[in-house]
Image (cartoon, coloured by chain):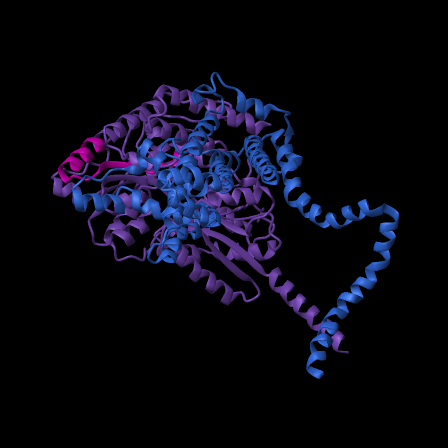
Chain colours: A purple, B blue
């Protein structure tokens, strides 16, 4: 009798734990700013409204998303939902939510513009939605410019104009560097496009580096050699490792910092009243004044054991009111057409600089080049970015001559394309 | 009487399930012994251990080797194409092995070169530092236990913590520059973006992190040396340097050998603290072999697990050679001891 009771109890416990497991939805999430906190709050509300689904939010470092998640996905594992930036590269791992969401038309209408960025070529899959649309652009330390008596370059100022002005500020204010750009292929692609670069060949595969790309890279290397650009960020790692220069800007060590719209909340929070700063948009080159669009997407992973629960979670987070609230609280540009078209976003900050910066970024989206708009959905973007970062990093560290770096970049990309074809 | 019988009764009670199991397996084991003989029984008892070794060591090795013979970016073996020794050929395609830039996989040869110099310098400096530390800690110091703990403490730290601590010390706005500025008025220097300083820093930091462990092994060796030898030397008026070279060092040789081989193997595998401290930079000046394998297989855009597997097999060969060297020396010393 006793044995029977024990066995029955054990069976009940096992059933209960299995039932709980069946309703678990695990989200792998990274944060640039305050969005982790906002998401935690929203997840709490979702669980209250949907007691049958237990959402577990795993806050991880961006490097985990970039380096470990792809390996987990290749092995057929990973979370149920993830916030990612390599959305096209990993598209084969995303779950098609079309048959699972409540209203596929709502998704097409509101997230259709970026749907191609995150689905396999040629499919009409609904993989997820952009938690934010980003655009690369510059930030200037206005206090340093004012103190140096150097006027901020105007709206159509070129990279040369900014370099000259920032250099004057650096010399006057004795800051370590005039300018910095994140160690990232995505970031440096924006000025390369402004100089006329076109990564995409006629066959849709990567083209060798063209004059536009080489022109900007040559200037960048020269500017780093003469101390205009920060050397620290680009030589402080090997390979494709990402390094932001945000801390240098926050610490008042830079006159001009080229990063992107996702930094607005971070800068607003960390700089506070220490100094005045402004978003500048992207400086111009001979061909354009473009930034690089991008962003992070919340995508469902096809290896999930609970696709219906995952779809319910995705439906909830894709709701117009939730997207609006998320954008207002995180200071991110929304990727939801309805939210954008209706306008009236009330960004939750009393920081006027942050509000002005967001307005500037919204304006800057109008000057985004056609090539820039194509790249987030192009399969080989990350391959080109990786080769450029690796070899230019070596050049700045004095290991390669620039001409050799150009040859190596082309060879690296060709080898990767060959590897992918095997 | 009752107190004497209680433990034995408890023991008998505890042994009941054991006896039950023994009785259960007794018959089949007897049968097995009859069928296979004593040799078969040895294999039977070794089987569980061999099974674990096979699953967790041998099988991954074989899988790794199979991966090294495949190409493409897919992770599943079934989706990968057999390319034979192409990955090895790619690693060895070089104009000159002394000039990494002439090689198809220049990063691999840069990593090999960096690892080679790192191993030579780090192990040599590590042994000297650990030996000096052990000699000092073996003396009659005040608060000797405290000092032993101080030198051993970094060994207890996670490599990530070690990397971060030293990054905060060495970065442009770090502690070292602050101290140099406060006391010498020196302008901040970027220790972690200067190729030579960064390489030296990786050696220094890894010595700081691991030296305590090796010092402890040497300290144990020093304490095992009979005191009467030193007393005899003192009575003979032998100079301290001669005592060190003629008594201490020869009798410490077995421990030193263990330390050398362990430090060599650990140095070849260097990765974590350096990855946190320098990320392999500036450029590729602190890119070591393990990081190359990690980046190639897991971190770069369009990962290449086949190439990473081939590089790790080559690294494995080096480690096997070092291990065999250790075993050979160990046996030689054992034989010497017997004679």
Residue A50, visible in the rendered structure:
yes
- From the viewer's perspective, is residue A333 above or below residue A375? below
Q: Quadrant of the N terminus of chain B?
A: bottom right
| Residue A182 belongs to magenta span | yes
Q: Nearer the viewer, residue B281 or B205?
A: B205
Q: Which image quarter: residue B113?
A: top left
Identify the residue at image location x=32%, y=38%.
B192
Q: Is residue B233 left or right of residue B330?
A: left
In percent of width and height, residue B250 lies at 47, 38
Residue lying at the far front of the rendered structure: B236
List x then y, in percent, for residue A113. 46, 42
Hey, which residue is sitting farthest top in the picture? B95
Quarter where residue A419 is shown = top right
Q: Which residues are magenta?
A: A162-186
Query: Is residue B152 shown left or right of residue A73?
Result: left
Q: Total label count?
A: 0
Counting from the top left corner in percent of width and height, residue B79 is at: 64, 34
Residue B168 or residue A16, whichever sits in front: B168
Q: In the image shown, does A15 or A302 lie closer to the viewer?
A: A15
For the point 75% across and 74% down, the residue is A3
- Where residue B189 appears, as percent x and y from the top left, is 24, 38
Residue B279 visible in the shown view? no
The answer to which of B40 and A290 lies nearer the viewer is B40
């Amino acid at each position: 009798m006793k044995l029977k009771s024990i066995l029955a109890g054990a069976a009940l416990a096992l059933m209960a734990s299995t039932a709980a497991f069946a309703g678990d939805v695990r989200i792998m999430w990274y944060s640039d700013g305050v969005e982790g906190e906002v998401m935690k709050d929203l997840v709490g509300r979702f669980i209250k409204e949907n007691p049958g689904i237990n959402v577990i939010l795993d806050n991880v470092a961006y490097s985990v998303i970039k380096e470990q998640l792809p390996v987990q996905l290749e092995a057929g594992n990973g979370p149920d939902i993830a916030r990612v930036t390599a959305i096209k590269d990993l598209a084969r791992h995303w779950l098609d939510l079309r048959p699972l969401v409540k209203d596929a038309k709502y998704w097409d209408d509101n997230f259709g513009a970026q749907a191609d960025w995150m689905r396999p070529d040629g499919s009409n899959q609904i993989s997820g939605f952009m938690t934010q649309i980003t655009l690369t652009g510059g930030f200037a330390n206005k206090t340093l410019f004012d103190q140096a008596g150097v006027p901020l370059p105007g709206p159509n100022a070129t990279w040369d104009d900014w370099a000259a002005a920032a250099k004057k500020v650096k010399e006057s204010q004795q800051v370590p560097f005039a300018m910095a750009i994140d160690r990232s292929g995505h970031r440096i692609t924006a000025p390369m496009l402004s100089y006329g670069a076109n990564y995409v060949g006629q066959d849709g595969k990567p083209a060798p580096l063209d004059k536009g790309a080489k022109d900007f890279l040559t200037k960048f290397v020269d500017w780093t050699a003469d101390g205009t650009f920060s050397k620290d960020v680009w030589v402080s790692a090997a390979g494709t490792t990402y390094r932001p220069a945000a801390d240098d800007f926050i610490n008042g060590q830079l006159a001009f910092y080229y990063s992107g719209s996702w930094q607005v909340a971070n800068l607003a929070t960390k700089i506070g009243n220490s100094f005045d700063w402004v978003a500048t948009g992207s400086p111009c080159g001979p061909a354009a004044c473009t930034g690089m669009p991008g962003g992070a997407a919340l995508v469902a992973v096809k290896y999930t054991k609970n696709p219906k629960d995952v779809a319910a979670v995705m439906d909830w987070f894709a709701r117009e009111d939730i997207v609006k609230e998320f954008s207002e609280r995180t200071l991110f540009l929304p990727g939801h057409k309805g939210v954008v078209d209706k306008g009236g976003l009330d960004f939750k900050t009393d920081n006027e600089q942050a509000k002005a910066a967001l307005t500037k970024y919204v304006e800057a989206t109008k000057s985004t080049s056609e090539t820039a708009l194509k790249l987030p959905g192009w399969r080989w973007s990350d391959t080109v970015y990786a080769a450029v970062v690796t070899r230019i990093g070596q050049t700045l560290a004095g290991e390669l001559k620039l001409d050799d770096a150009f040859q190596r970049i082309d060879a690296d990309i060709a080898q990767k394309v060959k590897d992918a074809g095997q | 009487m009752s107190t004497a019988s209680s433990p034995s009764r408890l023991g008998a009670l505890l042994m009941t399930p054991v006896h039950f199991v023994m009785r259960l397996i007794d018959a089949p084991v007897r049968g097995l012994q009859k069928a296979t003989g004593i040799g078969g029984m040895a294999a039977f008892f070794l089987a569980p251990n061999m099974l674990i070794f096979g699953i967790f060591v041998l099988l991954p090795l074989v899988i790794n080797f199979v991966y090294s013979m495949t190409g493409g970016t897919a992770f599943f073996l079934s989706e990968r194409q057999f390319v034979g020794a192409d990955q090895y050929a790619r690693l060895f395609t070089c104009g000159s092995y002394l000039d990494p830039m002439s090689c198809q996989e220049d990063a691999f040869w840069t990593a090999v070169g960096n690892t080679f110099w790192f191993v030579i310098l780090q192990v040599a400096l590590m042994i000297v530092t650990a030996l000096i530390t052990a000699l000092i800690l073996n003396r009659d110091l005040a608060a000797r236990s405290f000092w032993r703990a101080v030198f051993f403490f970094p060994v207890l730290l996670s490599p990530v913590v070690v990397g971060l601590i030293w990054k905060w010390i060495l970065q442009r706005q770090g502690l070292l520059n602050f101290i140099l500025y406060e006391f010498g008025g020196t302008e901040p220097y970027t220790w972690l973006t200067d190729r030579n300083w960064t390489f030296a820093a990786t050696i220094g930091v890894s010595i700081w992190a691991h030296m305590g462990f090796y010092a402890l092994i040497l300290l144990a060796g020093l304490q095992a040396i009979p005191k009467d030898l030193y007393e005899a030397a003192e009575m003979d008026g032998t100079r301290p340097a001669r005592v060190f070279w003629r008594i201490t060092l020869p009798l410490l040789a077995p421990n030193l050998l263990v330390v050398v081989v362990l430090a060599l193997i650990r140095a070849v595998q260097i990765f974590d603290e350096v990855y946190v401290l320098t990320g392999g930079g500036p450029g590729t000046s602190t890119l070591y072999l393990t990081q190359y394998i990690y980046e190639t297989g897991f971190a770069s855009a369009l990962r290449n697990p086949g190439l990473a597997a081939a590089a790790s097999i080559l690294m494995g060969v080096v480690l096997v050679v070092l291990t065999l060297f250790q075993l050979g020396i160990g046996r030689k010393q054992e034989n010497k001891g017997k004679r």
